[in-house]
Structures are given as C-alpha cells and as structure tokens.
Amino acid sequence: MCSKCFAPHEVFPPFLVLVTGPYAKRIFVSELGAEASSVVNGVPLEDFGGHHPDPNLTYAADLVEAMKKGDFDLGAAFDGDGDRNMVLGKKAFFVTPSDSLAVLANNLECIPYFKKSGIKGYARSMPTAGAVDRVAEVTGKKIYETPTGWKYFGNLMDAGMLSLCGEESFGTGSDHIREKDGIWAVLAWLSVLANKKMSVEEILLEHWQKFGRNFFTSCDAEPCNKMIAELEGVMQSQKLIKKSFTSLNKSYAVSNMDNFEYTDPVDKSVASKQGLRILFEDGSRIVLRLSGTGSSGATVRLYIDSYEKDAEKIKQPAQEVLKPLINIALEITKMKEYTGRDAPTVIT
C-alpha cells in the first residue's frame, strides 16, 4: 500500500490510530504523512501491554475517551494483527461493523481498488445486521448471508463471486486478499472521506436517510443450553409466527423463526444449526448463538438488529431505540427465568 493509491494526504482529516504498530507507523505516518503521535500503543508486546486486543468500545476505551475531546475527525482501533477494525468519528461517533460495511459498499466509486476491479457481490455473516443487504438491493448486486467464519467468504472469493464482506466481530475485507484486513478497511474509509469531503457522522446520516438504519448490539449471557433447546422447540412449533410483541410503545410482529442453515454455493457443503433467528416483519431480527464449549455449556451470544426507516428516529441514541427489542428478546428467550438475570453479562 502506498500514498499513490489514495488521494493526497493533505485532504485527510486528523486521525488517531490504536495498536498494530509497525504497519500503522509505516502506512499512516511514513506514507500518508500523519503525525507520529497519531499511532498509540504502537510497540508490539507479547501481553498487548496488559490490554485486551479486541477493537470494540469496551476494550478500546482509551481511544473512545481521546476521540470524545473532539480533536480528531477519525479514530481507528485494530487488534494485534490488524485484521479487525473499529471506526470512530469526531467526538467518538461510533460506526457499527454493519454500517461500516454498508457505507463502503455504497461508496465504491471513492475506493481505487473497486474503481479498477469492479464489484462482484457482497457478503455478511448471519449475525451481522443487514445494512449492506439494503445497499445490494438498490445497486442490484448479489448479497450472501453466511455462517460465522471467514472460510465461507474465502470460498466465494475463490469462485469470483465476492468482492466486499464483513462480520459482526469487526472484521471487514475484500478480495484483494483472502482474509479480513482492518488496515485496508480504514484506508478505504479515508478514501471515502477524502472524496466526499464530509465527516464520518455526516456520511452515516446521509446513508441512513437513504437506506434506513439498522440499530445493532451484541451481548453475552451465562451458559444455558436448556434455554436454547426450549426456544428451538418453540420455533419448530411455529406458534409465534405472526404474533406481535410490544415494549415501550414499540411493536414487532414475528414473520419467521429458524435455526440458520447455509448451503455453500461453491462446494455445496451444508452448515446447519448456525444460530437461532427470530425475524420480524419490519426487517428487525433477534439472533442467538452458542459461543464456545465446555462441560457447563456454551455462552449464549445475543444479537439485536432493530431496523428503523423513520427519518426522525434514525438520529436517536442507539440504546434508546434498541431497548424495546432487547426487552422483547428477554421475554421470548426467558433469559431471566433460566439465568436469574434480566440483563446480559457483557455488551459490545
């Protein structure tokens, strides 16, 4: 990667980068002319300096606090090997992984790689909010919904069926390499910012006005295989189909429920039982997956994807909009009954 691949660095906004040191220093400082102080935690350490390497609002709290001061227009956090990324705008405006993927998909003309190679299709992991689906529908491109795991994207890339993809755990990539590439994703964002000459927040507001907004959060709860097994039984009975649930004056009607199954269009292999999905008529979703193994059972990972197309509501705080669907998820899953808790243990 070099500065010749992107617009001159003079048009880039000031930005702050956290971790993935040597690559960040070479690319952002040496090649693109950012100040050396832009790279924080840039010395590789075996224990990550006592920090957790995952790039999210919880583990990149130092970056969030630095961005809140308003001195930087773009902040990016990476994990230790730079394959995952988190993007923040001025004053810590947070870009969800699903929105990041959708914005890049909707601004391909700003990214030199896609201007040269074109776009074959998009893909997202099943738990990832469906923001990019709406871009694919408008642009007439193929969209693939895959199980969690980059190998499914890799198969599509190898077959020439996929150009841009992302997953809920802050992974973004394209077919320039058969793996997620967080640094490339942030460089792509810089290209979009340089071309549109808008702030991160302005770009997202423009995007939501056109496509609507997928409010998204994920969280972990205690191990509870019994809860998942009962919910599977409810799904098989289909008794919740067309049923409406209401919380805080917001109603959601169930359109379908299933345990996600994926048939790979390339090698025809089948991946079954990839996560329970509760789909609502307005495009919102509740997803539950068992994450990890052990004698005490696997941790339940809960994903909330609340779709909103009302032009006024898309500007509201995410937790305010998500609260009704979170309450409904707790009601449907009976999480309090099974775990003794009325809230998840970890939220990201």
Image (cartoon, rainbow, N blue to C red):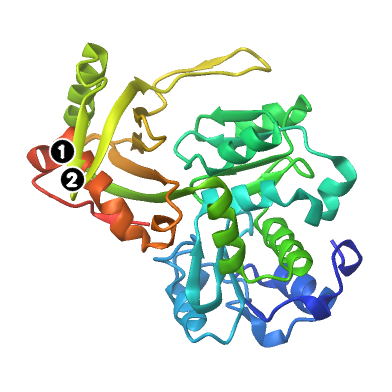
Label 1: how many Cα within 10 Å (few below 14, some 14–19, many 20+): some
**Residue 160 falls in which quadrant of the image?**
top right
Amino acid on which disc 1 is placed: Glu
Q: Where is residue 347 drawn, in percent x and y?
A: 32, 56
Q: Is residue 273 above or below residue 253?
A: above
Q: Which is more foreground, mark 2 or mark 1? A: 2
**Residue 139 falls in which quadrant of the image?**
top right
Label 1: which secondary element: helix
Label 2: which secondary element: strand
Label 2: how many Cα within 10 Å (few below 14, some 14–19, many 20+): some
Q: Is residue 165 above or below residue 181?
A: above
Q: Badges 2 and 1: C-beta atoms under 8 Å apart?
A: yes
Q: Residue at x 78, y 38 (%)?
A: 119
Amino acid on which disc 2 is placed: Ser
Label whose residue precedes the other's in the sequence (2 or 1): 2
Q: Is residue 303 left or right of residue 174?
A: left
Q: Is residue 338 above or below residue 156?
A: below
Q: Where is residue 11 drawn, in percent x and y?
A: 79, 77
Residue 203, labelled with which disc?
none
Q: Which residue is mark 2?
A: 247
Q: Is residue 106 left or right of residue 283?
A: right
Residue 331, labelled with which disc?
1
**Residue 215 visible at all:** yes
Q: Where is residue 89 drawn, in percent x and y?
A: 56, 71
Between residues 182 and 102, which one lies in front from this camera angle? 102
What whole-number distance in Å separates the C-alpha atoms at marks 2 and 1?
Answer: 10 Å
